[in-house]
Amino acid sequence: MSKLYLVPTPIGNLEDITLRALRILKEVDLILAEDTRNSGKLLKHYQIENKMQAHHQHNEHKTVAGLIERLRAGTTIALITDAGTPGISDPGFLLVRECISNEVPVETLPGAAAFIPALVNSGIPSERFHFEGFLPHKKGRKTKLEHLAEKDCTLLFYESPYRLVKTLKQLAEYFGPERRASVSRELTKIHEETMRGSLQWLANYYEQQGVKGEIVIVVEGRQK
């Protein structure tokens, strides 16, 4: 029976993949990958020899109709991204929506997502949180920051190393320089690091030290 599987992949350490995920990747007819070269390394590591096809933000609107046809015809497909869970700041939503509209079964496996370990490791309350992902680069950024500054739950952001200092300074400006926060980078990798402090302290620290790797910022909510 046809089905779309959303399969989380490791965010760094290749051991962070489930036995079920490996079985699904071996059994499906086709694997859709955000970057076939990157995913090829994972599949090779686990000796998975299966057909792959590129599926990313630049081609998903063009290919989704053909994929739905294949699924309705009985093909089983697994969708993976470069790291983490498909649909979380990565391609996935469009294909899932079209599958639901066409009554194609969708099954999402549990697994890696960078913001969960960053949140738990931050020392900031985790019972209520808002995952924002990447902030707008330009248009709407100021309005978004003003809106988020009023939220009283923990806030989570993804950021690149090239914009980290700028973002921390803006968060300090809109949220207040003493708002508690943490910066986690290179999660699950050899040089994993989490730094905790005020937004202003973190901005100063990374401006002096520099930064590499993928980043999650966790910020405490506005105190009532």
Image (cartoon, helix red, strand yellow):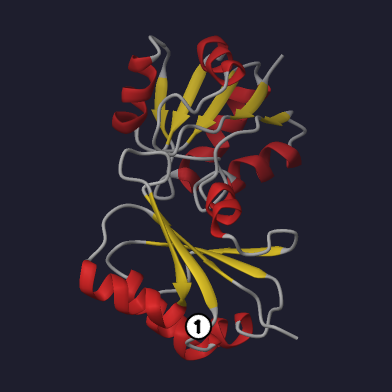
Q: Where is residue 36 in the image (x, y as percent from the top left)?
A: 34, 30
Q: Quadrant of the C terminus?
A: bottom right
Density class for disc 1 (Cα within 10 Å; few <14, some 14-19, many ≥20) is: few
Q: Where is residue 100 in the image (x, y as percent from the top left)?
A: 74, 39
Amino acid type, callout 1: Gly
Give the number of marks.
1
207 sits to left or right of 170: left
Residue found 67% across the figure and 23% down from its top: 3
Asked if residue 218 is positioned above or below residue 6 in the image, the reply reads below
22 sits to left or right of 200: right
Residue found 67% across the figure and 85% down from its top: 150
Task: Give whichever of 168, 140 is nearer the camera.
Answer: 168
Q: Can residue 138 be seen in this view?
A: no
Q: What element carries label 1?
A: loop
Task: Give whichever of 6, 200 is nearer the camera.
Answer: 200
Task: Give whichever of 67, 208 is nearer the camera.
Answer: 208
Q: What residue is shown with label 1?
A: 140
Asked if residue 102 is positioned above or below residue 198 in the image, the reply reads above
Q: In which quarter of the image is the N terminus?
A: top right
Q: Where is residue 69 in the image (x, y as percent from the top left)?
A: 61, 28
Asked if residue 5 is positioned above or below residue 19 in the image, the reply reads below
On the image, which quarter does residue 160 sit in? bottom left
Residue found 65% across the figure and 33% down from its top: 110
On the image, which quarter does residue 83 sit in? top left
Q: Position of residue 220 (x, y in %)?
A: 61, 73
Q: Is residue 53 visible?
A: yes
Residue found 55% across the figure and 59% down from its top: 122
Asked if residue 129 is positioned above or below residue 57 in the image, the reply reads below
